[in-house]
Image: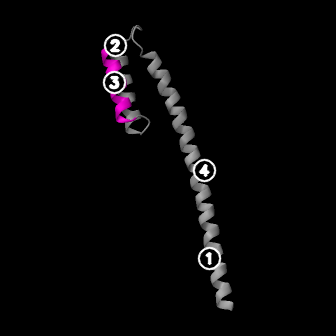
Amino acid sequence: MMERISEVETRIANLSRIAETKKQAQELVRYIQSELCEAKQELKVLMAEAKPGKAKSANQSLDLLKKLKEAKDAGLLTEAEFDLKRKKLVDSL
């Protein structure tokens, strides 16, 4: 009987640790989502600055292209989003 109680207590302790780890993981996911949202907003601002009709130098376009590539590499843009934005940027030159 004592052995059974010990098993139950061990399982309860394990479940408690799992629940705490899950909670920490969920908090980390929320933090990452928040950071991703902020990065996407910054990218929108950069893209708005790169719209056709605004005068920009080749250096500015190159810098923006590098930032788009960094955003894609960081997972902020999909390959398709990157290609679309890159094409718009190149077409605006």
The disc labelled 1 sits on which kind of residue?
Answer: Arg
Considering the numbered disc 2 on the image, is that residue within a helix, a strand or a loop? loop
Q: Is residue 79 magenta?
A: yes
Q: Which residue: 35% across, 12% down?
A: 57
Of the pair 50 and 83, the residue shown nearer to us: 83
Counting residues from the start of the chain, the first of labels 2 and 1 encountered is: 1
Q: What residue is shown with label 2?
A: 92
Q: What residue is shown with label 3?
A: 86
Marks 1 and 4, Cα distance to the nearest angstrom? 24 Å
Q: What residue is shown with label 1?
A: 11
Relative to 12, say whether 57 is above or below: above
Q: Is residue 38 left or right of residue 65?
A: right
Q: Quadrant of the N terminus?
A: bottom right
Marks 3 and 1, Cα distance to the nearest angstrom? 54 Å
Q: Are marks 3 and 1 in contact (CB under 8 Å)?
A: no
Q: Is residue 69 magenta?
A: no
Q: Position of residue 12 (x, y in %)?
A: 65, 74
Q: What residue is shown with label 4?
A: 27
Marks 2 and 4, Cα distance to the nearest angstrom? 41 Å
